[in-house]
Image: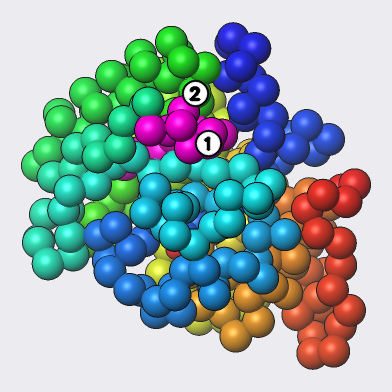
Amino acid sequence: MDWGLQNRIARFVKPITGHTVMLAADHGYFMGPTRRLENPRATLEPLLPFADAVAVTRGVLRRSIPATSDVPVVLRVSGGVTVLKEDLSDEAITTSMEEALRLNVAAVALSVFVGAPHEHQSLVSLAELVDEGEAMGMPVMAITAVGKELEKRDARYLSLACRVSAELGAHLVKTYYCENFEKVVEGCPVPLVVAGGPKLDSDRAVLDLCEGAMVKGAIGVDMGRNIWQSDHPVAMLQAIRAIVHEKATAREALQMLEPGRKPSAARSAPA
Ligand code: 5RP
């Protein structure tokens, strides 16, 4: 891997642990003003000091994240369809590599829709983006999207989608946690991070998901709704950091959510 590409990845996959806590806020580009992300600036501002990266579109980046921020950015570059359509797979590249370089981002990300009506177009977009990324020193993260078919999230399907993404050259893959997640990890030769998906029933369920993913071989999370839709988003993000960077168990991390507990260090402090 070329130096620039490695260096960009090292901005958000912290070299000290080899792990990462990415804050996903790239929902509005197809979901509109998602609950508790209606005003991205207000939602993100208290969270950014505790995130190893933030995942956003260029619109939110320019309007809602100060250019003086030192948080690494993973730029969502695919889109073109909204929740009003039944088939969410009809995406194309919506933001150029030149724009990503201009915005000085740490990586670009796009969704791939394996098995969906527009599978071919999303996979070709991935391969073309990787060609550009390799030429420019820009890491590409593939997101194994399932659209509205959340039931697709099992080890058999996700193993296929992650492996195909890696074979086409993705440097990182974001996928879902599932039963037998270790099989997904085993079949994927590049690092995996997990999304959270729609808000889970309890804090413990979120932390169990994070612990399970880390124990089974993920290098971190790229999580949104289960953080910023929480009633205590900063504490939740810190609890997830403890699992990802300090090998805390879900039970230990849950104690960090107790009311009145003092906040722990932000991302810039040693792990
Ligand atoms: C939206 C995305 C999100 O980044 C991804 O789903 C993670 O967010 P959440 O934890 O809320 O599922 O790709 O397009």
Q: Quadrant of residue 19?
A: top right
Say whether residue 69 is left or right of residue 81. right
Of the residues under marks 2 and 1, which one precedes in the sequence? 1
Judge whether residue 154 can be spotted in this image: no
- Residue at 43% x, 10% y: name it: 135
Q: Which mark is residue 151?
A: none
Q: How many marks?
A: 2
Dots 2, 1 in contact, CB < 8 A: yes
Bounds of the magenta segment: 99-116
Q: Quadrant of residue 32?
A: bottom left
Amino acid type for the residue under numbered disc 1: Val
Which quarter of the rendered picture does the N terminus lie within?
top right
Q: What is the basis of the colouring in this image?
A: rainbow
- Residue at 46% x, 15% y: name it: 136
Q: Is residue 103 magenta?
A: yes
Q: Which residue is mark 1?
A: 105
Amino acid type for the residue under numbered disc 2: Met
Image region (quadrant) for ligand 1: bottom left
Q: Is residue 108 above or below residue 265?
A: above
x, y percent for residue 210: 63, 58
Badge 1: residue crowd in 10 Å (few <14, some 14–19, many ≥20): many
Q: Look at the numbered disc 1 and give the secondary structure of its residue.
A: loop
Q: Is mark 1 within 8 Å of ligand 1?
A: no
Q: Which residue is mark 2?
A: 138
Say whether residue 118 is left or right of residue 210. left
Q: Is residue 151 magenta?
A: no
x, y percent for residue 30: 25, 60
Q: CA–CA distance between discs 2 and 1?
A: 8 Å
Tell which tag, 2 or 1, sits nearer the viewer.
1
x, y percent for residue 28: 33, 63
Say whether residue 245 is left or right of residue 122. right
